[in-house]
């Protein structure tokens, strides 16, 4: 069966510091991968998605970036965190099955920027 | 553009039935998802509807009307553990097949 891992689970970082969040998927090949952010009281905001190694699409211009160095690894980074980067970061995967592309989420990383 | 509307919060009594509504406007339509999200946890997949009608999965059922741009999630025999946020997400037919999520409905089940 497929599993998705994210780490760290929680993170407290000062403003201006760098960020690296990692997501890995097991049990499937060539998944679509996604990074979402969920701010308190708000919906899921899609940040990046990837349909293959080295292929990254950005949905929202900001100080974050993403990379996919391996088929089942997706990394979210920042060179300098802002206060507004605080939130719950969720990685998700899906595989194309006709027109259905159900997303399955990882456990998330709660980031607090102080 | 795409727009998803669902109530912000609902309350219900243990053992009762609750219906959570969702209306959507999308560029084309390729289905609607419902997810459950407990506080501090990731969303978990509940259902996917692409054809009109009701689909039942145990205590949870999901309904879709494509002509009305409307869906609902029906929870029967409510339990305290059903207290969670319920996210509606609509899939448009153009391009990347990435769903647009609503802000979620926070359901509080009380004894």
Image: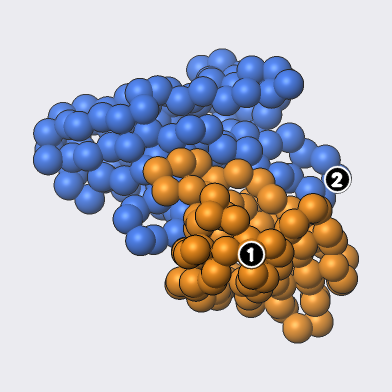
Q: Point out residue A41 in the picture as x, y percentages from the top left corner.
A: 35, 61
- Write down the residue under mark 1: B15
Q: How is the image coloured?
A: by chain
- Write down the residue under mark 2: A98
What separation in Å lies between label 1 and label 2 (alpha carbons)?
38 Å
Most foreground residue, A16 or A43: A43
Q: Do marks 1 and 2 share a chain?
A: no
The answer to whether the residue labelled 1 contacts the one labelled 2, judged by CB atoms less than 8 Å apart, is no
Most foreground residue, A27 or A70: A27
Q: Residue at x 70, y 18 (%)?
A: A27
To which quarter of the image does residue A103 belong?
top right
Q: Point out residue B63 in the picture as x, y percentages from the top left corner.
A: 78, 69
Specify the subunit that label 2 lies on. Answer: A
> The chain drawn orange is chain what?
B
What is the number of the mark on residue A9? none
Crowd tier of the residue under label 2, counting other residues whose Cα lies within 10 Å: few below 14, some 14–19, many 20 or above: few
Crowd tier of the residue under label 1, counting other residues whose Cα lies within 10 Å: few below 14, some 14–19, many 20 or above: some
Specify the subunit that label 1 lies on. Answer: B
Most foreground residue, B39 or B50: B39
Q: Secondary structure at mark 1?
A: loop
User: What colour do you see for chain A?
Assistant: blue
Q: Quadrant of the N terminus of chain A?
A: top right
Q: Residue at x 68, y 29 (%)?
A: A31
Q: Residue at x 56, y 16 (%)?
A: A70
Q: Is residue B99 above or below residue A97?
A: below
Q: Point out residue A93 in the picture as x, y percentages from the top left corner.
A: 62, 34
């Amino acid at each position: 069966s497929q599993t998705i891992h994210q780490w760290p689970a929680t993170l407290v970082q000062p403003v201006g510091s760098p960020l690296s969040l990692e997501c890995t998927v097991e049990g499937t090949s060539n998944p679509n991968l996604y990074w979402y952010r969920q701010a308190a009281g708000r919906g899921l905001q899609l940040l990046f998605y990837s349909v293959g190694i080295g292929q990254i699409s950005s949905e929202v211009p900001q100080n974050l970036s993403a990379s996919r160095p391996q088929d089942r690894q997706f990394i979210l980074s920042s060179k300098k965190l802002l206060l507004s980067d605080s939130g719950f970061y969720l990685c998700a995967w899906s595989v194309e099955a006709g027109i259905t592309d159900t997303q399955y989420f990882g456990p998330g990383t709660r980031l607090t920027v102080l | 553009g795409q727009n998803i509307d669902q109530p912000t919060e609902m309350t219900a009594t243990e053992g009762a039935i609750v219906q959570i509504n969702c209306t959507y406007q999308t560029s084309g339509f390729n289905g609607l998802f419902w997810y459950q999200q407990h506080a501090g946890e990731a969303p978990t997949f509940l259902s996917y509807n692409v054809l009109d009608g009701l689909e039942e999965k145990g205590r949870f059922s999901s309904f879709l009307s494509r002509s009305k741009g409307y869906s609902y999630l029906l929870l029967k025999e409510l339990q305290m553990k059903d207290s969670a946020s319920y996210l509606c997400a609509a899939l448009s037919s153009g391009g990347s097949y990435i769903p647009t999520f609503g802000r979620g409905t926070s359901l509080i089940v009380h004894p």
